[in-house]
Image (cartoon, rainbow, N blue to C red):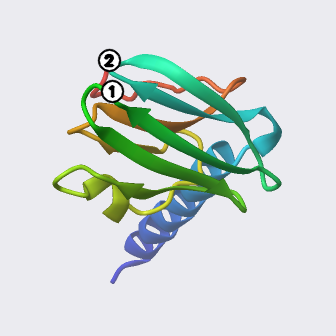
Amino acid sequence: MKKNDVILIGVVLILSLLSFVAINWYQNKSSDDMQVIIRHEGQEIKVFPFNENTDEVFVFVDEDADETNTIIIKDGIVTVEEANCRDQICVKTQSISKNGEIIVCLPHQLTVEIYAKSGEFELDGVAE
């Protein structure tokens, strides 16, 4: 390897590390301005404040369609604990805890999202 190759590799590693730190800092903003938004068929049905001290259990029930989801917000994480949908993907989805993360139950058309009120998402080159 030549000297310039080593310098180039070092610069790329430093930029990668700085990018990783910046992304994690942005996603882990103060949880005081964060909230959990639960939507059904695109309509907001419930909003909870989200921080390390939030301890909530929300049971979504749509009696007309016989749909039930149990959502737990505790210790800084959000989980769909139980659902009566056929595929159970929402229950198998990993718990969420950062701004912008989402759990979706497609059969019930239900979404559970963590959202920072003061944070705006930046579009990347693909989304523009």
The residue at 16%/53% (across/down) is 86
Task: Give whichever of 39, 34 is nearer the camera.
Answer: 39
Is disc 2 in contact with disc 1, using a CB cutoff of under 8 Å?
A: yes
Task: Give whichever of 117, 12 is nearer the camera.
Answer: 117
Left or right of residue 68, residue 28 in this image: right
Which quarter of the rendering shows the C terminus? top left
Above/below status of 81 relative to 105 = below
Q: Residues within 10 Å of mark 1 (few under 14, many from 20)?
A: few
| Residue 126: x %, y % from top left | 27, 28
Left or right of residue 41, residue 17 in this image: right
| Element under disc 2 | loop
Above/below status of 4 relative to 90 = below
| Residue 80: x %, y % from top left | 45, 54
C-alpha separation, residue under disc 2 versus residue under disc 1: 5 Å
Which residue is identified by label 2? 128
| Residue 12: x %, y % from top left | 46, 61
Amino acid found under the numbered disc labelled 1: Gly
Q: Would you say residue 87 is visible in this rendering? A: yes
| Element under disc 1 | loop
Which quarter of the rendering shows the N terminus? bottom left
The residue at 36%/34% (across/down) is 110
Task: Give whichever of 34, 121 is nearer the camera.
Answer: 34
Left or right of residue 58, residue 126 in this image: left
Which residue is identified by label 1? 125
Above/below status of 39 relative to 1 = above
